[in-house]
Image (cartoon, rainbow, N blue to C red):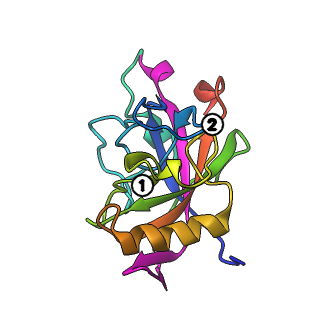
Amino acid sequence: MITLQPILIGYIPKQTAKRPDLLQAAGVEEICSASCCCSKSPDDIGAPNDFGIYDSPEEAMALIESGHMHEYDLYAYSMFPVIFREGLQDSFEIATLRVTPLSDSFEFLGFDVVSRSCGFCFECSPLSCNNMAEQIVVNRHCLLDDIEIAFESAAKFEAEQCEPGPYHVLGIWRHKRGKLRQT
């Protein structure tokens, strides 16, 4: 049983992609992973925090050019204070951040397992980037509903090097659609 609590690490706008034809995972409708491989964030990301995302919804949405807000969803990420290296779980210290608390205008979508080999931004999610969602039960957002499975998958993906590791487990939240301009 996982007793660790995730820590809110920030916000980022992304263009949520529909499931690509290449990914044949049952029930997946869209890709909401922390990776920007399928669902893109703006090209010019400015000066984000230690995780390559922003401390407030306002900072994140300031990246969007006028007239393009309707193309983006606002995501928030929480991160468990663990890291997976060589297939093993170890503690990971998350420095104190000044992240605006999550409002009730966000809905929880699921858990993602994501690589971070360069130490700054999140890179690839094997669930969507390597089609691992075809082998593991995921939800319509291409995320995991079960935290235990997320931790097991992180160890497995790192040990098998789906993508260069290490790996982290994140909780993925999205601003409820239709309310974006109210942030």
Query: Between 55 and 163, which is closer to the camera in this rendering?
Result: 163
- Secondary structure beneath label 2: loop
Percent of width and height locating residue 42:
34, 34
Residue found at x 67% / y 42%: 106
Residue type at mark 1 is Pro
Percent of width and height locating residue 94:
47, 74
What's drawn in magenta, residue-wise? 68-97
Query: Between 166 and 59, which is closer to the camera in this rendering?
Result: 166
Q: Is 16 rendered above or below residue 167? A: above
Residue found at x 50% / y 39%: 58
Percent of width and height locating residue 110:
63, 51
Sequence-wise, which precedes: disc 1 or disc 2?
Answer: 2
Quarter of the image for the N terminus: give it. Answer: bottom right
Which of the 4 quarters of the picture holds residue 162? bottom left
Q: Is residue 4 visible?
A: yes
Which of the 4 quarters of the picture holds residue 78? bottom right
Residue type at mark 2 is Gly
Residue found at x 34% / y 42%: 37
Which of the 4 quarters of the picture holds residue 158? bottom left
Residue found at x 48% / y 74%: 155
Q: CA distance from mark 1 to mark 2?
A: 17 Å
Q: Is residue 147 magenta?
A: no
Quarter of the image for the C terminus: give it. Answer: top right
Badge 1 crowding class, 10 Å Cα cut-off, few under 14, some 14 to 19, many 20 or more, is many
Residue 61 numbered mark, or none:
none
Reading the image, the residue beneath label 2 is: 27
Badge 2 crowding class, 10 Å Cα cut-off, few under 14, some 14 to 19, many 20 or more, is few
Reading the image, the residue beneath label 1 is: 126
